[in-house]
Amino acid sequence: MNLTWTATEQRFRDEVRAFAQQQLPQDIRERTLRHQRLERDDYVRWHNILADHGWGAPNWPREHGGTGWNAMQRLIFEIECFRAGAPRLLPFGLSMIGPVLMKYGSAEQCATLLPRMIRVEDWWCQGYSEPGSGSDLASLKTRAVRDGDHYVVNGQKTWTTLAQHADKMFCLVRTDPDARPQQGISMLLLDMRSPGVTVRPIRTLDGGQEVNEVWLEDVRVPASGLVGEENKGWTYAKYLLGHERTGIAGLGHCYRELGVLKSMAAQTQVRGRPLLADSRFRDRLSNLEIDIMALEMLLLRVASSNDGTPGPQASILKIRGSEIQQDLAMLQMEVAGPCAWPYDPDWLRADAAFQGPGPAMAAAAGAAYVDMRKTSIYGGTTEVQKGIIARMMLGL
């Protein structure tokens, strides 16, 4: 990073770097850097290692069990952990529903649910998108009808990330079908083990099961699972999306994949010399690195403003982060060359063994390329983000 570090920030950076190098389990590190699939236990182990050190919730205030770090500390932590090969911290609890509950949830919800997020005692998933209600989220049709001290929920959610592991879901439901679309929505917290919840996998281009469809048939949710007020869910949903889109910028991921790209280019021989020595390739690499540095500066500005609450600027972060991640994946696949084409999803299994650089490069480049196509769609498509910027920042 092209930053002038204060002595305090440098010491903190050294502390995080040493911790990640020493405490991150080697098997998790290797699978992450090879782009192999991680199991539920891999994420839970890393979360608990961090929690034991008091770093389980890096973006939370101290009063809720977090670190109380400032924007620069959070940025340093993310970058150094990613560079070391750590998996991403699961965002659904820590970065999404957690902040919503801190701002809008009841005291009981905060006391009961927040501590369990830090150690992934509850794995959360996000019940937003539906068939026909992705970019136009306000058109969602999943219904919740009050029945005594419960809500009865019927509908379908789709593209639900890692729902196969989830214990709980924060779910947008329509509680007033006669109100304007944005005004008749509520947010419920439901147990994924409840009768009537069915999870079905959606296979992705890389052969994985990262996303799912979730069917909700007469699912009874206690009224205590309502977040805030009934029919005010659109306000909470927008607040959550600001945090999600800031995270999708993926700065730590960008720096890690830049390192992977440089390593690949150093090992790839072209006309008897490393590709990294080619001036034209270095130009493309430098342009990408400059883009990442600019993204970093923007992320710091957004994180340091408005009391750390993301505004419409999060849409800029989401667009640029998505584009840079796709550019990195594209250039990695170009460097892999012919090795990228015989892609086999079995290479991404946690127990797969790599034989030499060819298969490893193929798995990394081929899988990353097809997987990164999704970044400009999830969390709000690029077209939707541009509309938000035009309306809320440019006044168009």
Image: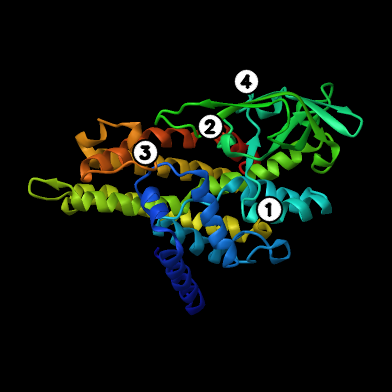
Category of crowding for the residue at label 3, using alpha-carbon neighbours closer than 10 angstroms: few (below 14), some (14–19), many (at least 20)? many
* 3 or 4: tag closer to the N-terminus: 4
Image depth: mark 4 or mark 1 in front:
1
Amino acid at the residue labelled 1 = Arg
* 1 or 2: tag closer to the N-terminus: 1
| Residue 217 versus residue 52 in the image, above or below | above
Numbered mark located on residue 132 in the image: 4
Q: Mark 3 points at which residue?
A: 348
Distance from the alpha carbon under mark 4 to that under mark 1: 33 Å
Left or right: where does residue 22 sit relative to residue 186?
left
Amino acid at the residue labelled 3 = Leu
Category of crowding for the residue at label 2, using alpha-carbon neighbours closer than 10 angstroms: few (below 14), some (14–19), many (at least 20)? some
Image depth: mark 2 or mark 3 in front:
3
Q: Mark 1 points at which residue?
A: 116
Name the element at disc 3. helix
Q: Mark 2 points at which residue?
A: 211
Image depth: mark 1 or mark 2 in front:
1
Q: Residue furthest left?
A: 272
Image depth: mark 3 or mark 4 in front:
3
In the rendered image, residue 125, in percent from the top left (x then y), is placed at 63, 39
Amino acid at the residue labelled 2 = Val
Distance from the alpha carbon under mark 1 to that under mark 2: 23 Å
Name the element at disc 1. helix
Q: Residue furthest right?
A: 148
